[in-house]
Amino acid sequence: MAWPSRNHLENLEEILVRLHWLIQPDTILTELPYDLDFISKTDIEQFADWCRSVTDKQEMEKGEYTVNKPLVKFFVEKVFPELDARLQKEKVVFIFKQLYQLLKVSIYEPITLSNANIDKIIDILDNIQGESYFDKTVRKIKVSVALKWLQDDELSEVLSKETKDFIRRCGDFYGRAKRGEHLYVKDIGAYYPPPEDKTKIIEDFQRKVELALLEVSQEIKNARAKVVTKGDLGSFSWIIKSIKRLENFIDGKHDSDYDYIEQFKDTIFVVIILNYIQDPYIKRTPEAKELLKMALPVYTTYKKMLGQGTKSRASR
């Protein structure tokens, strides 16, 4: 299921191209509920992922078991414990019927629990959505970058309470989407910010996000122009500077000229990279694994530091 015949820098360059036109400051709050609805998993997607996570790899390869109602019922009880017995039963019937419809198998035939069938289910769902996994990954990165920006302290300080509440609500729903829940636009709700908030959002975007995306794009282009083969990170070597700067900021060792805008740019940079290399459909190269091992602890510590109320801005 990995993205075929593409290297990481090519993927990232195309992601940045998409982000430039996907993240529009005047419509970002209107679009977020639809983005969250799109990137969240349907019941059948969750079931396919769950089957992979709980079944032994060798058993999946051999296809030793079949998908039956008791298995689907066990999945529903584990994943949707908040539903009452009636709703759980309805969900079991729906998922079971959908499996047969997607695979075009007679209801009297058994469905083998195998990698081939799980892959086929996911591929069919991908085509039904009308957008590829690449598109879905880009939308995930869009939401992650947008929320990182919209929840930034500097912007948050100048927005109305209603707008901040909606942004916080979208952040909560994003957490649920990442846990595998399927969301609906109607559950998230619509919001149209007042003109004064929209003006502030546009101005902040132009000063920070637009600049960050342009600089990240340039970094990727520069990296593509160089052939890097030495070291554990290979073509990812260019990202080390951003990670190190954030690490130094956490340790209080950042340079005096490392201002708030530079910190914000590095944060956005790392958010994009982490979302990309953790995507389940990219090629699991040694370089990607090594970068994840390096970047994730730094970013996790950085978020924890900000969450504890530590000063979030470098000297201006």
Image (tube, rainbow, N blue to C red):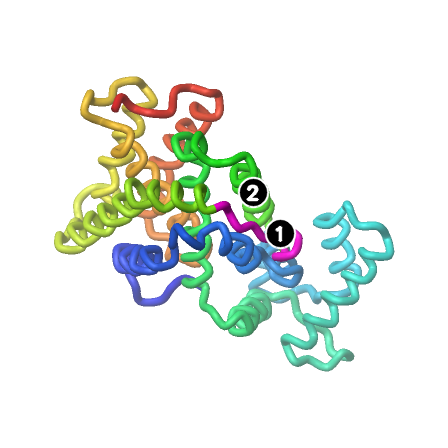
- Judged from this view, the residue extending furthest toward the left is 226
Image quadrant of residue 212?
top left
**Residue 166: which numbered mark, if any?**
2
Dots 2, 1 in contact, CB < 8 A: yes
Residue 114 image position (x, y, % from top left): 60, 66
Magenta stretch, main secondary structure, is loop
In-front residue for pair 59/284: 284
Give the magenta range. Answer: 184-194
- Which quarter of the rendering shows the N terminus? bottom left
Residue 302 image position (x, y, % from top left): 40, 28
Instruction: Let me know if residue 189 is in the magenta part.
Output: yes
Q: Give the vertical position of 307 relative to 131 (above or below).
A: above
Disc count in the image? 2
Residue at image coords 19%, 50%: 218
Relative to 298, 162 lies left or right: right
Residue at image coords 69%, 64%: 65
Residue at image coords 33%, 43%: 203
Q: Mark 1 points at which residue?
A: 189
Image quadrant of residue 34?
bottom right
